[in-house]
């Protein structure tokens, strides 16, 4: 658990950078880096659905950063996240949180084109992930996701 929290701390830096950034491309590239690190961290939290979800999110975020996220790819990612997430869920109801958060966020990403809409989508996603993080013992990510949601809100208001 300690190793997972240390890796999550590194991912947290990218979460905060994403929440504060105003540039669409940077927002998604920071999130891609965060997702890669969190995929590794979830190995240490014994959450296979977290690993698969985060790995898919990293790919999705790269596609978003480079404007390669089409309606077809959005649908593909929603199906992949739902199917793989449900198949690999070893955490019961708790394991459904990253699946739900990621499906909602993926659909939101397709429609959100401006920084404010992206940030609102991020806030919903971060709140759901914060709940999941705390339930699996990833306290670093839980706190950082909560702070990042507040940072994203502050960024919208500035």
Image (spheres, helix red, strand yellow):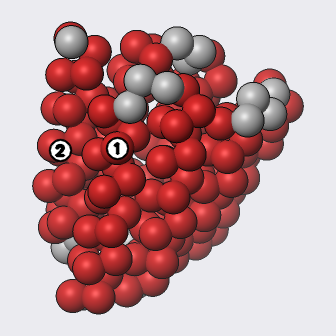
Return the mark for residue 17. Answer: 1
10 Å crowding of disc 1: few (<14), some (14-19), many (20+): some
Residue occupying the point 34% across, 77% down: 7
Q: Is residue 144 above or below residue 94?
A: above
Classify mark 1: helix, strand or loop: helix
Q: Is residue 52 above or below residue 35?
A: below
Choose between 60 and 75: the one closer to the eye: 60
Residue occupying the point 30% across, 58% down: 12
The x and y percentages for residue 112 are: 56, 17
The C terminus sits in image quarter: top left
Return the mark for residue 151. Answer: none
Q: Residue furthest right?
A: 72
Residue occupying the point 73% across, 35% down: 66
Classify mark 2: helix, strand or loop: helix
Answer whether residue 35 is visible to the viewer in this image. Answer: yes
Answer whether residue 131 is visible to the viewer in this image. Answer: no
Specify whether 153 is left or right of 17. Answer: left
Q: How many marks?
A: 2
The x and y percentages for residue 148 are: 24, 41
Specify whether 65 is left or right of 17. Answer: right
The x and y percentages for residue 61 are: 61, 44
* Residue 19, picture quadrant: top left
Q: Is residue 125 above or below residue 117?
A: below
Label 2 and label 1: CA atoms lie apart by 14 Å
Choose between 75 and 10: the one closer to the eye: 10
Q: Is residue 51 above or below residue 68?
A: below
Q: Nearer the viewer, mark 2 or mark 1?
A: 1
Specify whether 123 is left or right of 67. Answer: left
Q: Give whichever of discs 2 and 1 has the lower sequence position.
A: 1
Task: Find disc 2 in the rendering and name its residue.
Answer: 146
């Amino acid at each position: 658990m300690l190793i997972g929290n240390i890796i999550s701390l590194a991912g947290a830096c990218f979460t905060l950078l994403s929440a504060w950034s105003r540039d669409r491309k940077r927002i998604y590239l920071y999130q891609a880096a965060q997702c890669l690190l969190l995929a590794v961290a979830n190995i240490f939290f014994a959450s296979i659905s977290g690993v698969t979800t985060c790995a898919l999110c990293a790919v999705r975020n790269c596609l978003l950063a480079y404007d390669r996220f089409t309606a077809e790819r959005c649908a593909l990612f929603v199906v992949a996240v739902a199917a793989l997430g449900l198949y690999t869920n070893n955490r019961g109801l708790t394991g459904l949180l990253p699946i739900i958060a990621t499906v909602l966020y993926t659909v939101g990403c397709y429609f959100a084109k401006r920084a404010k809409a992206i940030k609102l989508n991020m806030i919903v996603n971060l709140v759901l992930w914060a709940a999941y993080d705390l339930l699996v013992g990833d306290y670093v990510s839980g706190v950082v996701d909560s702070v990042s949601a507040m940072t994203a809100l502050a960024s919208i208001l500035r």
